Amino acid sequence: MKKYEIISSFKSLPIEIFWYPADKKTLQTIFFLKGLYGLHDPKSQDSWDNEIIKEAKRKYNFVCINTAREKIDSPEKHSQEAFAQKTFKKECDDIYRAYLYLTEKNILKKTQKISIIGNSFGGTTLLGIPELIKQSSSIIMIGSGCGKSATTIKPLLKTLFSEKKLLKSISQYQGVFVYVRGSDDNVVPQASQNKIIEAVSKASIKIVYTLQNAQHNLSNSLDFSTHDRGKILSSILDHTVFLTK
């Protein structure tokens, strides 16, 4: 794994880019966009990104991005405080800036096919980056939505683009689109999820996977196990990439 840092337009704070080259040469690179305020920690034993990378790094290059955020000294403070004053647009800009850096430095080759896994708010963020959507041969969203509460005060969410604007770019997408969700998700309303699914009307292939008795994070509603997320999502990733060939 190699780590790169570039500067965000948000208070000139750093954006961290983690590049995981595949074990063998490949033409496939996977961008993993984490959920709201998500932080990639290469040493974490309990994260979606590391679970998937562990299962699939032999086949694919992986990119994880920590967008710019303030440092919070007290661990008791909620992570959302690190994003105070940051807008949704600046969050989107950070992701696209990381993509441009990798291409300009030729780390991400022009011959590479790009697939994107957007976990929860990561998928919502992707909706705000039409340039990246156009570059993607396949997109996998996991429990993502396209709206917000009218009374929310959470950073990023309160400046979320309008639903119409968020759905516009994905409605033109022509690659392979996959949506994964838990049947018992009580975090993102199913109506919000369905709006994304329905908007994807021009995709070459569209698949929806519903994991029964699973919550928003795909943990089992009955025993709170994680449904072997890494293996399940790695299998879905393999199938999705295969369909792009």
Image (tube, rainbow, N blue to C red):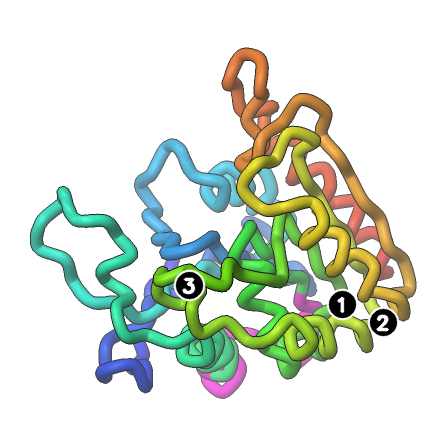
User: What residue does disc 1 label?
Assistant: 137
| Residue 104 visible in the picture | yes
User: What residue does disc 2 label?
Assistant: 174
Closest to the observer, 88 or 28: 88
Q: Position of residue 47 (x, y in %)?
A: 43, 39
Rounded to the nearest angstrom, the CA distance separating label 1 from label 2 is 8 Å
Magenta-highlighted residues? 101-114
| Residue 102 visible in the picture | no
Residue 164 is drawn in which quadrant?
Answer: bottom right
Closest to the observer, 10 or 15: 10
Residue 192 is drawn in which quadrant?
Answer: bottom right
- Quadrant of the image containing the C terminus: bottom right
Residue drawn at the location 43% of the way across and 61% of the way down: 151
> Counting residues from the N terminus, which is met first, the one under dot 3 or under dot 2?
3
Whether 99 is drawn above or below 84: the answer is below
User: What residue does disc 3 label?
Assistant: 65
The amino acid on which the numbered mark 3 sits, given as a three-letter code, is Ile
Residue drawn at the location 37% of the way across and 32% of the way down: 45
Label 3 or label 2, whichever lies nearer to me, is 2
Whether 65 is drawn above or below 23: the answer is below
Closest to the observer, 167 or 228: 167
Badge 1: residue crowd in 10 Å (few <14, some 14–19, many ≥20): many
Whether 244 is drawn above or below 120: the answer is below
The amino acid on which the numbered mark 2 sits, given as a three-letter code, is Gln
Under tag 1, what secondary structure?
strand
Would residue 101 be found to the left or right of residue 192 on screen?
A: left
Question: Number of marks in the image?
Answer: 3
